[in-house]
Amino acid sequence: MPYEEYFNAACEGLIIVDLSGQIIEANPAAERLFGYSEEELVGQPVESLVPMKLRELHAKRVQDYLKAPRPRAIGRGLNLAGRRKDGSQFPVEISLTYARGTPRGDLAIAAVTEITERLALEREARRADTLISLGTVAAGIAHDLSGPLQVIRSLSELVLELPSTTPISEVNRDLAAVQRQAQRAAQIVEEFLELARRNDKIAAPVDINNLVDGALLLVGESMRSAGIKVKSRLDRTLPQITGHRVALERVLINLLTNAQEAMQQGGDVEIVTGQLPDEPGWLHVTVADSGPGIAPDSLSKLFDMDYTTKSKGSGLGLWLSRRIIQEHQGKIQVQSELGRGTTFTIKLPMGDYSSS
């Protein structure tokens, strides 16, 4: 098939760009996709087809591509978005081909595909998977709640039967135990409710450093009271991401709480944020503790739904944390060595994202 016939008949949007970033040709599919005529597209910078808040990042990706041009997908692992003439945005996949030495000079050809329908199907699949998982989790919830509820019932009956001459210190000791068990039961229930509510949250701009500040505000005092020194090194130049603020904050609080529980005799925790130098377009949040570490045979099971290294744990915290990060198209990794502490690293894309 001659070039012109293929170019005009292709189902994906094809946009040809010169090395200065100017559009020199677009096929009918690209016109329909972005809502422009070819006359309107030709001569425009390719960034005009990218949402405003992503243009700087997109320009950097283009520069990185031109340093080592080759046929490949752009922004692999990130959620990319296009911008139509009317200002609306839509998710896309882009693959680039570099054409060297053409009569019009060296060119880059972008094949753009809208993936709105595919992402909708994936979200439905995740929701179905969540419903299946809820049945398994519910069985675990019932099992985990039976322990603290039994203690609460036994101790409350004991307190009610105490003679009036019982020293107040003994009464307070038993009431404190009841309170601890009630808090444990409440945490188990909250984790289950959080799982059930996951798909009802609205994605919005999130400053990852503000999330760290908020998490430390909630648990920092408790950690200091436990003899844990908390340090932070935050890159305040990081751009906002789009995500679920409460869900991401919950992940940070869970990691900090786990670190505190692992260091019964006190220790150090450091939180670091920044961009990933070897992975352009990604940021990281690292939570490192000086605790006892995790045994190698436990590391591979750490994020399993029903697995916990704690004597009093539901096994849901890290499983739910990984699920939240995965829903943000990110990754959560752990490194640990016995006697040398544990480090959790969260990696999140800085591109536009919406899972709602």
Image (cartoon, grey):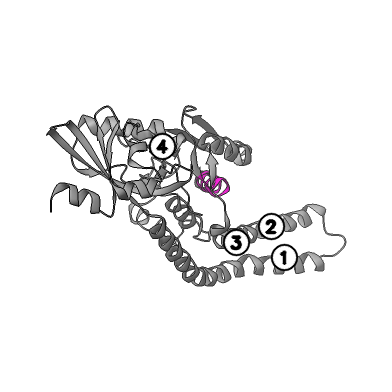
State the CA–CA distance, disc 1 to disc 4. Answer: 48 Å
Q: Observer-nearest residue: 87 or 118?
A: 87
**Which type of secondary structure does the marked residue at label 4 adopt?**
strand
Picture mark count: 4
User: Quick check: is 256 in the magenta stretch?
Assistant: yes
State the CA–CA distance, disc 4 to disc 2. Answer: 42 Å
The label shown at residue 283 is: 4
In the image as oriented, which residue stretches furthest toward the right? 164
The label shown at residue 193 is: 3
Q: Amino acid at mark 3?
A: Leu
State the CA–CA distance, disc 3 to disc 2. Answer: 24 Å
Q: Amino acid at mark 4?
A: Leu
Horizontal and vertical percent position of residue 183: 66, 56
Q: Amino acid at mark 2?
A: Ala
Q: Observer-nearest residue: 175 or 44?
A: 44
Q: Find residue 98 and report its image quarter.
A: top left
Q: Is residue 279 visible?
A: yes
Q: Is residue 50 left or right of residue 138?
A: left
Q: Find residue 47 and report its image quarter.
A: top left
Q: Which residues are magenta?
A: 243-260
Q: Nearer the viewer, mark 3 or mark 2?
A: 3
Horizontal and vertical percent position of residue 130: 48, 65
First along the sequence among labels 3 and 1: 1
Horizontal and vertical percent position of residue 23: 30, 34
State the CA–CA distance, disc 3 to disc 4. Answer: 29 Å
First along the sequence among labels 4 and 2: 2
Residue located beneath label 2 in the image = 177
Residue located beneath label 1 in the image = 155
Q: Is residue 271 above or below residue 346?
A: above
First along the sequence among labels 3 and 2: 2
Screen quadrant of the N terminus = bottom left
Tag 2–tag 1 contact (CB < 8 Å) = yes
